[in-house]
Image: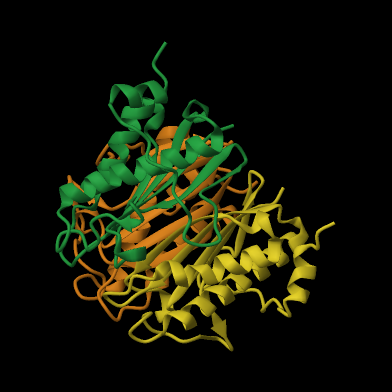
Chain colours: A green, B yellow, C orange
């Protein structure tokens, strides 16, 4: 039997960060119709956004990719809290990656791979969701990357 | 028993605006799998976009937040028309807020709170949906804010 | 009996392009809860993005609208491959259109009509989905348009 996501996280020497705190009257996760929607995640550490700025001008693409990975870990932390356990996730359905870019940057997909590669590593093939990746003009609190997640969780 | 959304709207002295008219061959609301997707709403008045421009450079953040509230009211109007009544909404599932920003603006989440706070006031706790908020380079017809809504409505 | 989508495509003298190849560890299509999510599509030809650049400054709006149409055909190609046939699509639920714009362009909705008009032509009234259209700062590989699709497919 394949290892579950919690065991895979251990094998990857990854720990889930503290679950995120919404910056307004919205929910970290909402469940409906057998699906669970996780709010867009930007990476916080000790109450501050990590590496604020635009990707390329202020934040190198490889750092942004790592932030996409960490934002995804935050999303998994929110899910684990809501579902009780990540073993309840049956598959990843959709990943939305928003990259705040300076003009002329065209590697949003490489940044987004930080999210997708982590999901594949944690969930195996069911971690391969659909994806939409775009470059945006800005993000809350000058964050360079935001990751939104939709999973199947009956 | 808690008051329903229609009664709460009355208590808040809010009236639903006329339901929106799509600017193309799409639908204001689509229902499927126990959910209802509302198309992205920009605020119109007498056929024209209200307060066109970029947030910060042309439109102050507090005005943009009020526009997010009004766009959400338009979304509720579309839902009321499609469902027959807002009492059919079981909960808010996801709110997408797109804010057209000038460079250096980083308070997209405060703008988005105009949408989230209204949904909480109208639906109570079930009005707390998941949320994704981003700053975009532009919106149709130079609108400063667009709000997209997904609700559970069996 | 109304013609199905495959017959309509023939009547429109349209052929589905080759199904898209994901640029990372994500899936072209994911099915869950009676719905099918198609990853964001940018238009490729012989391995290269077609007409790279920003809409208005580099790519005229009418060309961008045609690219929205072609991106939607790619999405239908991915769906046909996943579902076995487009006849399995019961209705279009949501269309997301991201247009990479230069400052001052405000006709994102006209670009998006390239996607919506095609869906209406191929599926008839069930092709009228909900829609969110935004202008973004950039897209992967400098593509001017990205189209994301969600359909009902039991």
Res A145 quadrant in image = bottom left
**Percent of width and height locating residue C84:** 46, 31
- Is A128 located above or below residue B42 in the figure? above
Res A77 quadrant in image = top left
**Percent of width and height locating residue A38:** 48, 46
Q: Residue at position x 49%, y 25% from top? A: A87
**Quadrant assignment for the N terminus of chain A:** top left
Instruction: Give the side of residue C79 with respect to residue B19, left or right.
Output: left
Viewer-closest of C135 and B97: B97
**Percent of width and height locating residue A91:** 46, 31
Please identify the residue farthest to the right as the structure is shown. B1
Q: Residue at position x 55%, y 34% from top? A: A83
Q: Residue at position x 55%, y 82% from top? A: B44
Please identify the residue farthest to the bottom as the structure is shown. B46
Viewer-closest of B144 and C3: B144
Q: Residue at position x 29%, y 81% from top? A: C104
**Quadrant assignment for the C terminus of chain A:** top right
Res B89 quadrant in image = bottom right
Q: Is residue B129 visible?
A: yes
**Percent of width and height locating residue C91:** 57, 48
Viewer-closest of C38 and B45: B45
Q: Is residue C113 visible?
A: no
């Amino acid at each position: 039997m394949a290892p579950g996501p919690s065991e895979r996280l251990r094998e990857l020497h990854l720990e889930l960060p503290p679950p995120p705190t919404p910056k307004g009257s919205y929910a970290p996760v909402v469940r409906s119709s057998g699906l669970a929607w996780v709010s867009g995640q930007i990476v916080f550490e000790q109450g501050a956004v990590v590496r604020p700025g635009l990707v390329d001008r202020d934040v190198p693409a490889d750092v942004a990719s790592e932030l996409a990975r960490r934002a995804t870990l935050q999303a998994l932390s929110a899910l684990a809290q809501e579902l009780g356990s990540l073993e309840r996730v049956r598959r990843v359905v959709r990943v939305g990656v928003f990259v705040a870019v300076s003009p002329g940057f065209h590697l949003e997909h490489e940044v987004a791979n930080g999210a997708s590669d982590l999901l594949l590593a944690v969930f195996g093939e069911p971690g391969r969701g659909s994806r939409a990746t775009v470059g945006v003009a800005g993000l809350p609190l000058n964050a360079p990357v935001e990751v939104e997640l939709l999973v199947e969780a009956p």
